[in-house]
């Protein structure tokens, strides 16, 4: 088990990259209807702001730049999204469609506390 600890920064980086790519996808669905449209018609202003945060914040987390403050913002965005869009539909997340929002919220909260892991711009700046 001790040998696995050496790979922890890389596992954290993998979590950061995959979460960021999935998060960016949510933003591109709103902004560009890619890979599919999330909704029909023009975006309400609040969803436009959310989409921009998802794409820009997701890109920053993906490369690991300003990772901690951006992850904190993304975590908060997902908490707000859960309570505004999902929580009022039903109590259980499996019934209100809010599982992804909760999971993103806590993954980004973990990244806020744990840092970017290996292979990030932040880590590279710290060692330079």
Image (cartoon, helix red, strand yellow):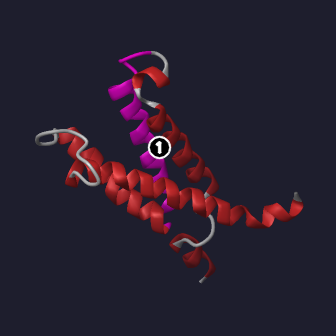
Q: Is the magenta stretch mostly helix, strand or loop?
A: helix
Q: Is residue 65 visible?
A: no
Q: Can residue 125 be seen in this view?
A: yes
Give the residues in magenta: 64-90
Where residue 55 appears, x then y in whole percent?
Answer: 33, 56
Residue at position x 55%, y 46% in the image = 107
Residue, disc 1? 75
122 left or right, relative to 46: right
Residue at position x 25%, y 42% in the image = 38
60 left or right, relative to 33: right
- Above or below, 114 against 44 in this view is below
92 left or right, relative to 46: right
Q: Which residue lies furthest to the bottom in this view?
A: 128
Give 43 or 80, whichever is nearer the viewer. 43
- Above or below, 48 against 10 in this view is above
Residue at position x 36%, y 18% in the image = 88
Where residue 104 appears, x then y in whole percent?
Answer: 49, 43
The quarter in which the C terminus is drawn is bottom right
Task: Please tell me whether residue 83 belongs to the stretch shown in magenta.
Answer: yes
């Amino acid at each position: 088990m001790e040998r696995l600890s050496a790979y922890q920064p890389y596992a954290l980086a993998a979590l950061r990259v995959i979460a960021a790519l999935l998060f960016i996808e949510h933003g591109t669905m709103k902004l560009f209807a890619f890979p599919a449209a999330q909704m029909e018609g023009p975006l309400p202003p609040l969803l436009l702001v959310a989409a921009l945060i998802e794409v820009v914040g997701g890109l920053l987390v993906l490369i690991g730049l300003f990772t901690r403050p951006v992850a904190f913002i993304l975590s908060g965005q997902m908490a707000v999204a859960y309570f505004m869009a999902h929580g009022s539909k039903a109590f259980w997340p499996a019934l209100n469609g809010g599982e992804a929002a909760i999971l993103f919220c806590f993954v980004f909260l973990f990244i806020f506390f744990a840092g970017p892991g290996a292979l990030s711009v932040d880590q590279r700046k710290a060692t330079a």
